[in-house]
Image: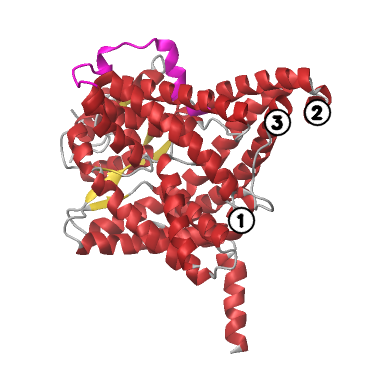
């Protein structure tokens, strides 16, 4: 459990090429991890095409798509193994402390 | 008895005959079972129903663009598409029989879970939801093509058993290769590209060396636009359409002018590429909206019923292990497909459409498998094999499927194998 500081739900977007399969799989694993951490969040999955214009706090994507978000102000979590809960957890925690959403 | 038949007819017309209603009910039940709060149940159910309607709209747009594509190729080359006579277009198939696919998807998933629970060697739970939907629809189309008078019971029973067997054995037969790539047994590979991926993995050993890996190559950054399927569809199909419009205009100006209507033929051709991509985006967004609500329910059920089972997931899960191979596999597949297309046109065999998504995802994934054992040669082979199978499979399946022939142009390599095997088996039954 970590201490969550924002006064609203966190918004996370998982992204893959077509927004059909692997983004949905990532969404389910990210949801599991967030539940475990006790962080209130709304997770959605989508394709690259629309991800850049979304208002999500954090974007979770495969490492091969991470450079697509270069130059945007979004916090990107690049995953090497899309369904490894340990990797998801450590990278998400890093992102959350970067955006000052959790107690260090 | 008459009253009972009335009830069945009512259910058939109003629920089973309306995919939006049926899938809405499935999502509603799934969300309630997951004990979601009321607002999420409502949102999820509505999203599923909107998704189904969007999918129908997208399928209609897609069918229109396919007709435009093929008319223009005919004007330019004289080769006419070979659809089966009196065929039922994809959008009609979905609106009339889409609910059958939904029922098959659900029943087959339950049978699949039972198989995984009972057979100790089979441990994978298939979770690639959008393919579960498409292949279920494909199986309905094959059954109806072979026997247009098949009853609802026959379609659902045959379809469910076929799908359950496929979802159970596919991740299992490719698991040794999958383990080699990701280095653990934590996840499986659930995708209808499995045959090309598996063949590439084993052929790779014979034609190349793992040391000659694609990951030592740096590709130009300009190629990264290819990762966006909508962009690559619009660009590649747009170029083909423009070339065909010019060639067609030289050959039969009146035909092309007719197709273009009030527009300049080149502008019309450019727009066709864009419309093609947009149709696919709408179609897939619709599928995404309902699959996104149903699959988490499936995952929840399987975790409760079969603790310790291995989740088998969509093909991009292997992409990070060899990102360069993915692009190389796509390019060699596209090259092979275009060569086959030219060859088909020259011999008058068939008109086929470059399916950018199917060249990218199955070709890219197979290239990761080919690269693992055979380096860049394995990756190039994997893509080329994918392009070859897609071209032949698309041409033959397009001529065979009386119901939803357009499904042939949306298919992955395993689809064509499933169609061929089912055709042989059902031909013997009916």
Q: Residue at x 59, y 61 (%)?
A: B18
Percent across and percent down for residue B78 are: 71, 29
| Residue at mark 1: chain | B
Does the residue at mark 3 contact the one at mark 2 (Cβ under 8 Å)?
A: no
Percent across and percent down for residue B115 are: 26, 62
Q: How is the image coloured?
A: secondary structure
Q: Which mark is residue B74?
A: 3
Q: Residue at x 29, y 24 (%)?
A: B378
Mark toward the viewer: 3 or 1: 3
Question: Which residues, given as a range, are shown in magenta?
Answer: B208-230
User: Which residue corresponds to mark 1?
Assistant: B95
**Do dots 1 and 2 share one subunit?**
yes
Q: Is residue A56 magenta?
A: no
> Which one is earlier in the sequence, the residue at label 3 or at label 1?
3
Q: Is residue B64 left or right of residue A22?
A: right
Indicate the quadrant containing the N terminus of chain B: top left, top right, bottom left or bottom right.
Answer: bottom right
One can see residue B285 in this view: yes
Q: Nearer the viewer, residue A98 or B403?
A: B403
Marks 3 and 2, Cα distance to the nearest angstrom? 10 Å
Does the residue at mark 3 contact the one at mark 1 (Cβ under 8 Å)?
A: no
Marks 1 and 2, Cα distance to the nearest angstrom? 32 Å
Give the SS element for disc 2. helix
């Amino acid at each position: 459990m970590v201490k969550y500081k924002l006064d609203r739900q966190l918004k996370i977007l998982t992204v893959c090429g077509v927004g059909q399969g692997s983004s949905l799989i990532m969404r389910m694993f990210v949801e599991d991890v967030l539940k475990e951490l006790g962080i209130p969040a709304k997770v959605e999955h989508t394709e690259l095409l629309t991800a850049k214009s979304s208002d999500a706090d954090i974007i979770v994507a495969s490492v091969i798509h991470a450079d697509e978000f270069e130059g945007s102000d979004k916090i990107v979590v690049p995953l090497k193994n899309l369904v490894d809960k340990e990797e998801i957890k450590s990278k998400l925690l890093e992102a959350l402390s970067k955006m000052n959403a959790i107690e260090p | 008895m008459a009253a009972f038949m009335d009830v069945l007819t009512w259910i058939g017309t109003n629920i089973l005959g309306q995919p939006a209603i049926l899938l809405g009910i499935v999502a509603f039940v799934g969300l309630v079972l997951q004990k979601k709060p009321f607002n999420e149940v409502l949102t999820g159910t509505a999203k599923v129903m909107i998704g189904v309607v969007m999918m129908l709209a997208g399928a209609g747009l897609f069918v229109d663009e396919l007709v435009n594509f093929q008319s223009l190729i005919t004007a330019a080359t004289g080769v006419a598409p070979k659809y089966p006579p009196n065929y039922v277009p994809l959008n009609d198939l979905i609106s009339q029989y889409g609910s059958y696919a939904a029922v098959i998807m659900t029943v087959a998933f339950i049978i699949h879970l039972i198989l995984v629970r009972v057979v100790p060697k089979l441990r994978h739970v298939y979770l690639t939801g959008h393919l579960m939907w498409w292949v279920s629809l494909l199986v309905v189309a094959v059954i109806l093509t072979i026997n247009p008078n098949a009853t609802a019971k026959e379609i659902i029973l045959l379809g469910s058993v076929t799908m359950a067997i496929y979802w159970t054995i596919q991740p299992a037969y490719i698991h040794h290769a999958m383990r080699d790539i990701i280095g653990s047994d934590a996840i499986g590979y659930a995708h209808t590209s499995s045959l090309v991926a598996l063949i590439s993995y084993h052929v790779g050993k014979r034609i190349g060396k793992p040391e000659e890996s694609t990951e030592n190559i740096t590709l130009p950054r300009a190629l990264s636009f290819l990762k966006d399927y909508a962009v690559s569809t619009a660009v590649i199909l747009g170029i083909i359409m423009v070339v065909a419009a010019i060639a067609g205009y030289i050959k039969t100006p009146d035909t092309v002018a007719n197709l273009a209507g009030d527009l300049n033929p080149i502008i019309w051709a450019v727009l066709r590429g864009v419309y093609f991509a947009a149709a696919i985006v709408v179609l897939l967004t619709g599928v995404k909206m309902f699959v996104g609500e149903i699959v988490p329910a499936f995952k929840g059920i399987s975790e409760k019923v079969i603790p310790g089972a291995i989740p088998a997931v969509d093909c991009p899960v292997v992409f990070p292990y060899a990102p360069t191979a993915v692009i190389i596999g796509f390019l060699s597949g596209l090259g092979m497909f275009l060569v086959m297309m030219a060859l088909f046109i020259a011999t008058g065999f068939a008109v086929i459409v470059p399916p950018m998504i199917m060249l990218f995802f199955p070709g890219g994934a197979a290239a990761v498998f080919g690269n693992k054992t055979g380096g860049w040669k394995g990756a190039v082979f994997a893509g080329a094999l994918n392009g070859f199978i897609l071209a032949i499979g698309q041409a033959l399946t397009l001529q065979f499927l009386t119901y939803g022939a357009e499904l042939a142009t949306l298919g992955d390599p395993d689809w064509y194998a499933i169609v061929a095997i089912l055709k042989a088996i059902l031909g013997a039954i009916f």
